[in-house]
Amino acid sequence: MLNAAPYGSGILAKGPSAYPRYAYSEADADLVERAGQMEPACEYYGVPLAAAALQFSLRDPRITSTIIGMSKPERIPQALAAVPIPDALWPELDALAAPPREL
Ligand SMILES: NC(=O)c1ccc[n+]([C@@H]2O[C@H](COP(=O)([O-])OP(=O)(O)OC[C@H]3O[C@@H](n4cnc5c(N)ncnc54)[C@H](OP(=O)(O)O)[C@@H]3O)[C@@H](O)[C@H]2O)c1
């Protein structure tokens, strides 16, 4: 399975305040709310929301490839930076993420 939108098209990279859109459309209120709770959870551990979003996809064994979109060259080192994610952050983000869909 490929994940070709690890930032949800941008909301999980720019943050829901700056970019309240998901999959190229206006995000629904629940999604904006949950993304808005992810931001302070990440900030508490000093982790950029984008880094957590990318590693959320990379750590899922069902996902064999993760494809990022970007329009600025400076995004490349940001994406490649191996930001350490404390183990304690994952349960908080898992609880805020949408329940997995049946495949
Ligand atoms: N998801 C799909 O359904 C689908 C279908 C066909 C093809 N694709 C392809 O898959 C790739 C990924 O899709 P996507 O671009 O929609 O999803 P995405 O990777 O979830 O989101 C990309 C967005 O995140 C922003 N971003 C990336 N790194 C950032 C950073 N460090 N800080 C702030 N913003 C950052 C980019 O903004 P900037 O522009 O400002 O860099 C871009 O608008 C694209 O090449 C797309 O064409 C996806």
Image (cartoon, grey):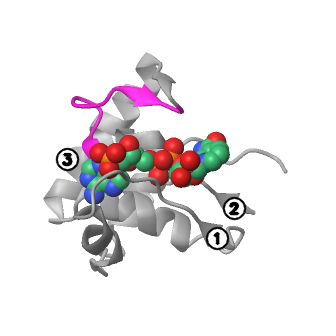
Left or right, 21 with reference to 23: left
Amino acid type at circle 1 is Ser
First along the sequence among labels 3 and 1 = 3
Q: Is residue 101 above or below residue 72?
A: above
* Quarter of the N terminus within the rendering: bottom right
Per the image, label 2 sits on a secondary structure element best described as: strand
Estimate the spatial distance between the alpha carbons at disc 3 and disc 2, rounded to whole Å. Answer: 28 Å
Which residue in the protein does label 3 denote? 40
Estimate the spatial distance between the alpha carbons at disc 2 and disc 1, rounded to whole Å. Answer: 5 Å
| Residue range of the region highlighted in magenta in the rendering | 14-23
Q: Which mark is residue 32?
A: none
Left or right, 11 with reference to 45: right
Q: Is residue 98 visible?
A: yes
| Residue 77: % across, % down | 26, 74
| Residue 88: % across, % down | 33, 69
Residues packed near mark 2 inside 10 Å, few (<14), some (14 to 19) or many (20 plus): few
Amino acid type at circle 2 is Leu
Asked if the magenta segment contains residue 51, the reply would be: no
Q: Quadrant of residue 86?
A: bottom left
Which residue in the protein does label 2 denote? 2
Left or right, 46 with reference to 67: left
Report the mark closest to the observer, 3 or 1: 1
**Residue drawn at the location 69% of the way across and 61% of the way down:** 2
